[in-house]
Amino acid sequence: MEFCGAGSITELIKAIRSNSLSVEWIAYVCREILRGLAHLHGNRVIHRDIKGQNVLLTDNAEVKLGQSLVYYITLHGEFLMWPK
């Protein structure tokens, strides 16, 4: 597991005086979330809890998706929850 020292996107927005991000930052975060979801879906994984608290930032401003529960889709279309 990778350390995300910059915290969540929710924490970042609360720490900014204007309580909003620039359009460029919003576009960057959205693009990285979509790339992460595409990777998960390509591996037959469903995140099921996308929210600001689960969008984490590293000290280098890399965007990571945090999660407590994920669902795997089996070859037969069944959902398996992890952790159980």
Image (cartoon, rainbow, N blue to C red):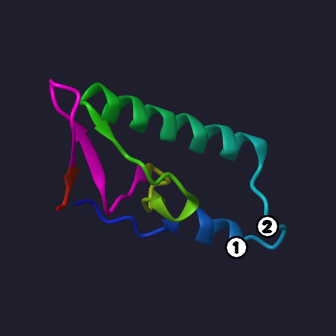
What percent of the width, then of the height, locates residue 8?
A: 52, 65
**Dot 2 crowding, Cα within 10 Å, few <14, some 14–19, many 20+:** few
User: Would you say 13 lies left or right of 81 here?
Assistant: right
Q: Disc 1 marks which amino acid? A: Lys
Residue 49 image offset from top left, x and y in percent: 45, 54
- Return the mark for residue 69: none
Which is nearer the eye, 65 or 45? 45
Q: Residue at x 22, y 52 (%)?
A: 81
Q: CA distance from mark 1 to mark 2?
A: 6 Å
Magenta stretch holds residue 39:
no
Residues under numbered marks 1 and 2 in contact, where contact means CB atoms less than 8 Å apart: yes
Q: Residue at x 40, y 38 (%)?
A: 36
Decide if residue 20 is on the left or right side of residue 33: right
Occupied quadrant, residue 82: bottom left
Q: Is residue 52 left or right of residue 18?
A: left
State the image coordinates of residue 43 (x, y, percent, origin top left).
24, 30
Quadrant including the C terminus: bottom left
Residue that appears at 29% across and 51% down: 70
Circle 2 residue? 19
Q: Quadrant of the N terminus?
A: bottom left
Q: Which residue is tagged 1?
A: 14
Q: For the point 16% across and 25% down, which residue is it?
A: 76
Amino acid found under the numbered disc labelled 2 = Asn
53 above or below 51? below
| Element on which disc 2 rests | loop
Nearest the camera: 71 or 64? 71
On screen, residue 36 versus residue 26, left or right, reads: left
- Boundaries of the magenta span: 64-80
Using the rendered view, name the quadrant where residue 74 is placed: top left
